[in-house]
Image (tube, rainbow, N blue to C red):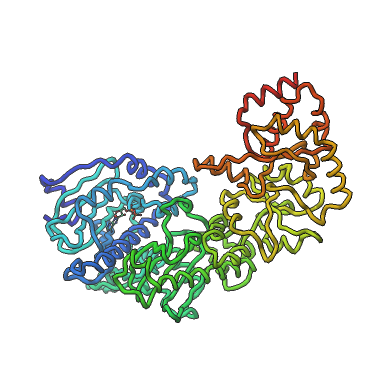
Amino acid sequence: MRCPSAVICHFFIPMSTQKHAFQAEVAQLLHLVTHSLYSHPEIFLRELISNASDACDKLRFEALADASLYGDQPALEIRIAIDKDARTITVTDTGIGMSEAEAVEHLGTIAKSGTREFMSKLSGDQKADAQLIGQFGVGFYSGFIVAERITVESRRAGLPPESSVCWRSTGAGDFEVEAITRAERGTSVTLHLREDALEFADDWRIRELIGKYSEHIALPIKMEGQKWEESKQEGQPGRMVKTGEWETVNQATALWTRPKKDITDEQYTQFYEQTTRDWQPPLAWTHNRVEGSAEYTQLLYLPAHAPMDLWEREHKSGVKLYVRRVFIMEDAEQLLPRYLRFVKGVVDSADLPLNVSRELLQQSRDVRAIRDGNTRRILGLLEELAKETGPTADKADDDKASGDKPIAPSDKYATFWREFGAVLKEGLGDDHANRDRIAGLLRYASTQSDAPAVSLADYKARMKDGQKAIYYLTADTLAGARSSPQLEIFRKKGIEVLLMTDRVDEWALSHLHEFDGTPLQSVAKGAVDLGELQDEAEKQALEAAAEHIKPLLEKLKTALKDQAEDVRVTTRLVDSPACLVAKDADMSLQLARLLKQAGQPVPDVKPVLEINPEHPLVKKLDGSPHFDDLARILFDQALLAEGGLPDDPAAYVRRVNALLV
Ligand code: ADP
């Protein structure tokens, strides 16, 4: 039996109707969606169109392997019908459709663990919150913002008409499904509008929203044509009537196939927002037709903010693959290296076969050429942004739906770096061929700059006469880095040190040994050799002190033989009595700690304790009756200052207290 709307179904109550409770998360989410997003009800249309478009993409993809899925209906399209009298709006697509089991699963549960995260991200600012919904795979439920009831009819491609399904719900607690017969492949979602949402039963309002949100969906979106009809009775006003013909109301062309000069910045931005479901205009884009050994078009965007799942292993790449304008697949991760996984956009290849699979992509030489080309373009775009010039997207429109203030060109690279810098750094280890270009894009905080804005080139330009290395320090936090004893001598000499606080820094820097001919040197590793920056008198004083202090060093070595690899005198300290450093060839203490926290095996290397012979505490050590305790305290304090924890914190406290008393 057909189920054109739930009204009719009520009369039948057939035996096959089954009630299902929503999964707890869905119920919770529905409550949230309807209560927190009601001031932006219109987003439902964007979400339903986007689902319809995804469904068509899925069919196109499955049909590459089995063309019979199209049946006798090759057209892929979206139709939107409004029935003013019945107060309904119906979004129909000729896409993949759902079987009964799929309807129960997809429209009754949320697969991803995204709900909790979605809820935790809600800010109370409805405008911002409304943008989150599409990113969490919960868009369908936004229909309940405007509908008191939703009816979905669907027939899975490849299944016969009698194996179709009707799904109904009022959005409160449960839903029903029932087997129906449906002539057409695909899905119709009918919203029974609430009293306060009748504005959406208006043809012009819907056309306006399609223009705003779905202009660049690459499928035709059709609505029934209308025409003005004069009244047959004299003196009565005329009215709009439906012509019975479907007309396409969006552009439905693939933007990237048009010549660059014909596309405005606003169109580029709109295309981005509509195809990525990102609500913020992109920072910049690059659009090129490449003709060479591989022939393809690329339209790649740099987003202005990081998605929630950027660091998750299953993070999807944002580049869609088309072959001669036919959509092939989402998140084609072969098209960009992982360290550029924040890039979004489209690649349209002229060479690949239409039935290309993910496995094939991995082996294809064409794909490798595309990947190299994409990488070069993105690095070039970043270099341009870093120079604050070039064809960037700085003409963002103020009164757009997003409403976000456009980012000034000079802030763009800073924005990029804040959002994605830590990801780009992975490239130092992963992309040897482009390592130098990536190194040029790095930015760090330093002892002379709070903002992470110092490039290696800036640093080099400021190096002191006689300085032979680029010095850096890694730590958990910027504050921790700044107060590290290891910096004391550098501060005294006015030598800049780069301060690094990303977890990836240590690993990334282990792949970058020099920049433009100058070695990079961790200040927490090996003996400090400031070379020509240290004057003769200082060197001699150190040697004299070392000689004088030799017996003390021997005693310390014995007292700390389980903790320290060696104990030696240093000039790197000014105000602190001691510090810990790693031997040159060893892993830094910071990296060892990070690995340990991550549960990874760490070689058991002991640090070197360096002491400041001029410090009163060190002077007091010799001949003290508490020598062993003082030695342990000296060591544990050096560990604390460097961001570590004593092996036995309670024993440390006991020792300090004993001395205090
Ligand atoms: P998302 O689309 O982000 O996954 P939704 O809540 O919007 O999340 O939809 C849930 C699921 O329901 C979709 O993943 C899809 O499997 C199914 N679905 C929704 N709309 C359609 C449609 N028009 N055709 C086929 N399947 C659909």
Q: In terms of image quadrants, where is residue 204?
A: bottom left
Q: Residue furthest right?
A: 537
Q: Position of residue 559 (x, y in %)?
A: 70, 29
Which sits in the foreground, 129 or 476?
476
The residue shown at (48%, 45%) is 124
Q: Quarter of the image holding residue 257? A: bottom left
In percent of width and height, residue 430 lies at 52, 60
Quadrant holding the N terminus: bottom left
In the image: residue 429, left or right of residue 73? right
Left or right, 103 with reference to 641 = left
Is 304 placed above or below 549 here?
A: below
Q: Quadrant of the C terminus?
A: top right
Q: Does any portion of residue 127 appear in the rendered image?
A: no
Q: Is residue 516 left or right of residue 174?
A: right
Work out whether 370 lies above or below 470: below
Closer to the camera in the image, 570 or 53: 570
| x and y, in percent, of residue 573 in the image | 78, 42
Please state the total of marks drawn on the protein image.
0
Q: Position of residue 241 (x, y in %)?
A: 26, 70
Q: Nearer the viewer, residue 352 or 451?
A: 352
Q: Please tell me in which quadrant of the rendered image residue 334 appears.
A: bottom left
Q: Kindly identify the residue that appears in the image at 82 percent across and 36 percent down.
A: 549
Q: Please, is residue 131 above or below residue 79 in the view? A: above
Q: Residue furthest top?
A: 661
**Which image quadrant shows ligand 1?**
bottom left
Is residue 457 visible to us here?
yes
Q: Residue at x 20, y 66 (%)?
A: 69
Above or below — where is 631 with respect to 176?
above
Say which of 507 and 437 sits in front.
Answer: 507
